Amino acid sequence: MTLTPLNAVLFGVVLLLVVGFYGLLITRNLIKIVLVLQILVKAVVVALVLGGKASGNLGLGQSLAATVIVADTIVAVVALALAVQVRRRVGTLDLAKISSLRG
Amino acid sequence: MAAILIGLVIGLPWLGAIVIWRTTDDTPHLQHTLAVAFSIAAGLASLALIRFSSAETAISIPMGRYFGDLTFTADGLAVTLTAIACVIGSLAVIFSVDYMHGEGQLGRYYSFVLLFIGAMTGLLLSGNLLFMFFFWEITALCSYALISFYNDDPKAVAGGIKALIITQVGGVGLLAGALTTYSALGSYQVSDLIARAGTIPAGLLAVIAFGFLLAAAAKSAQFPFHTWLPDAMEAPTPISALIHAATMVNAGVYLLARFYPAFEHVPGWTMSVLMVGLITAFIAAVSALIATDLKRTLAYSTVSQLGYMVYAIGAGGVFASQFHLLSHAVFKALLFLAAGSVIHSIGTRDMRRMGGLGKRMPFVRNMFIVGALALAGVPILNGFWSKELILEVGLQGSPIWAYGLMLLGAGLTAFYTFRMVWLVFFGAERDQLHVHNAGSAMKVALGILAAGTFVTWLFFGGLNGLLASTLPFHEIEHESLMELVTAIPSAPATWLALLVVALGAGVSWVRVRGLRLFGGGWLDLLVETSFGFDSLNQTIAKGVNKLAGRLSFTQTGVLSWNVVGILGALLVVLIFLVWSA
Amino acid sequence: MTETFYYIVLGLGASFCAYRAMISKHILPSTLYLAGVSALVTITLYLLGAYEVAVIELSVGAGLVTVLLVYALSVIGEDVVDPTSIIPKPLAFLLVAGIGGLAIWMAYPLVIHPNANGEVLLANVLWKQRALDVWVQVALIFSGVMGVLGLLSEKVHPQGQETQIHEVQAVREEHGIAIQIEQELHV
């Protein structure tokens, strides 16, 4: 089984995704969650460009990737603002203690 | 022209709903005026539409690949029911001017009433199954909102939710039928379903047929979904007259009548329809015998008469059912509105506290008696002609025992009707009640409806011609009014039915004069739980609540478990995709 | 062949940095590792031929996000949270391995060779064909600005933070007692 360059990129993307998902499940710190989301975003960006390259429409792939970067950075900003407010009002960033939506 | 009128008939009530929504509740006079104006305009448009009805599609708007075309067809069936809905709607709104005088939140009331009228006409005129479902759901929403109009009263709220849940279960049947039609035929158009029903594989056609039967039974409060209509009587009486007697509950009968040619050859369908109608008519009539709440009696009576209509469709008499639908809408609305006058003036619905009101409310008494005579099937009034037509159709198209039970039901109808009349308007006064006679708006509405009960049967020929010419698949025979007038009085079945009716009236006279209210014991218990079905409803509701309580442990509130849920779902989707590839 | 080798090295390096970012106990090292991931991803994008996006990725991922995280950290203060995870690790591992495996299984046949027909200029796509996206991004940036304002607002004194925690706990106790009383009354 020969490994073409694009296959190699695919493996890298899936590996990043796997690490990102695992981190999302494991971590207990609200700010770490924002961080892990950023890892996932990078994986998605590479995946979009990869898809563009494989289907020949690199311009479309890049344009979508740029949109995703902008959108997910805004998500990171808003999520961090929320995390700061949570820290100020509840007093902790531990996910196990932030469970007022219980039941 | 038909297209413009259709647009007016649906758009005017909706425009009125929006306009009244924007008015504030400190201008009740303006709200009353606007509501009456818009509903009368819609009523006139619907009457004008009768002139232009045809079997062709009047409006067709392409809505993209996945929804088909949004079509409206003004054929005879749709136009008749639209006229009923809009005209009786306007009469109910006129009645509301007096009935809801001084009530709070009129804006909410009138907006929902007008929204309902528009949605009902949309449902009737729609030629696209998916949009028919859409309008169906809007009418269910308005019905819920209006039943729970007095939302401080827990009984009203409970009644509204019960009606909503049960009619939604029926809506699932309609949606399933619509989607199955699309998957079998590639089109949502009603005309396609009726024309090409023969090309659908038998299993799928059975799914569609029984799905529609489910929807119709739930909407028209037929067995086994008959429990919601009596509880829906917590609504203000004009709403009971409009939605739960003359309009929304007819949607189920309309559905069955519309799709009869498509489903009549599905094995077991016509027999199921017949049985559903029969059982409903009978058990509702029995329940009405011992009910003590005036509106509840009328509700049971509505369910029973709808059972007659469904029975007629099952026996093959689509035209007979529509004729009875027309008569029933008029006299039942009359009865409800008259009852509303009584309830509004004395403040209670309990018949055990009424009595002898006829002397103090003569006009209402007379109107109520006219409606009662029509309900019982006394000659000359419209109820007589249509009920006899149904019984005749039943004699030809259904087993003899079914016919016999329906005949007995006619007798029971007469019994409980006269019992009701006697308990409310005659006899000695059983309680000290303050009585004032009906207001002028009420009188206008009642008078028009009473005149209608004398007159609507004369439209037999016109209705027959309309339906026969615009419904190509229904195979309705052309009959004229003269044929009706000569055929029915000469049929021996008619005299048999009249005998049973007289018997029922006589028995009621005897028993009720002695004030034996014919209840007690096992019959009471049976009716209380709606022949077991209300307890079934309660059990289901309790079971669902308990299950939800037990499952609440899944809502941990911790983000990590929610992420597990998301990723688990992703895994399931991926497995599904890989497996099916 | 060397191209494949580069991609493999870059992929492994990015994953390693991501793993370290996830694992480390303090936020500051995680942020630096994230910047590393960003840099390696940028190189990958450059090699794939997406030059514009590579630049955007570098400046946003390695620059903006790092600054953002460091600023949020400075506002909150380092909070060492118990590192044991709430979800049992085997469950997480299985879930994630399943997803990864299936993703590769499905996507593998689709990305084998680059297709070179109908190349459209990025400028063309971005500003003409997907012009709606640009408007969406503008709206998003506005909401992001408001988010930053939320980040900057309400600077509370360190003592104020402690009293807030105490107040919150006191309110919770009261609520708990109130519920108990209510239950007793019902019973």
Image: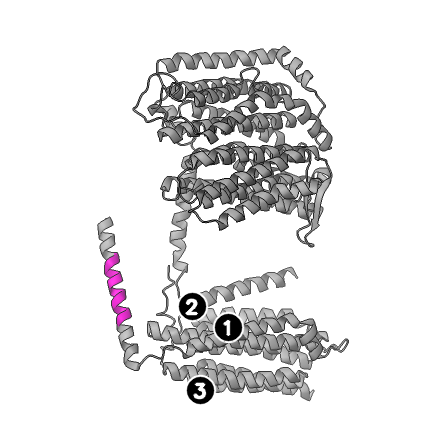
Q: Which of the two marks, 1 or 2, is nearer to us in this view?
A: 1
In the figure, C156 relative to B397: above or below? Answer: below
Q: Are marks 1 and 2 in contact (CB under 8 Å)?
A: no
Question: Magenta includes C175?
Answer: yes
Depth check, front residue: A77 or B9:
B9
Looking at the image, tell me whether mark 1 or mark 3 is earlier in sequence order. Answer: 3
Mark 2, Cα crowd under 10 Å, few <14 / some 14-19 / many 20+, is many
Q: Nearer the viewer, residue B55 or C56?
A: B55
Residue B2: where, in percent of width, then height? 70, 39
For residue C86, the mark is none
Residue C41 seen from this side: no
The numbered mark at residue C143 is 1
- Dividing the picture into quadrants, the one containing residue B210 is top right
Q: Which mark is residue C29?
A: 3
Q: In percent of the image, x 62 and y 62: which residue is there?
A: B577
What residue is pinned by disc 2?
Answer: B559
Q: Amino acid at mark 3?
A: Pro
The residue at the point 53 percent across, 71 percent down is C97
Q: Type of residue at label 1?
A: Ser
Residue A61 seen from this side: yes
Q: Which residue is pictured at 64% across the width and 46% down the height?
A: B180
* Residue stretch rendered in magenta on the structure: C167-179
Q: Chain of mark 2?
A: B
Asked if the stretch drawn in magenta spans residue C47, the answer is: no
Marked residue chain, label 1? C
Cα distance in 3D space between marks 3 and 2? 24 Å
Place of residue B200 in the rendered image (x, y in percent of width and height, measured from the top left): 70, 41
Q: Main SS of the magenta segment?
A: helix
* Chain at numbered mark 3: C
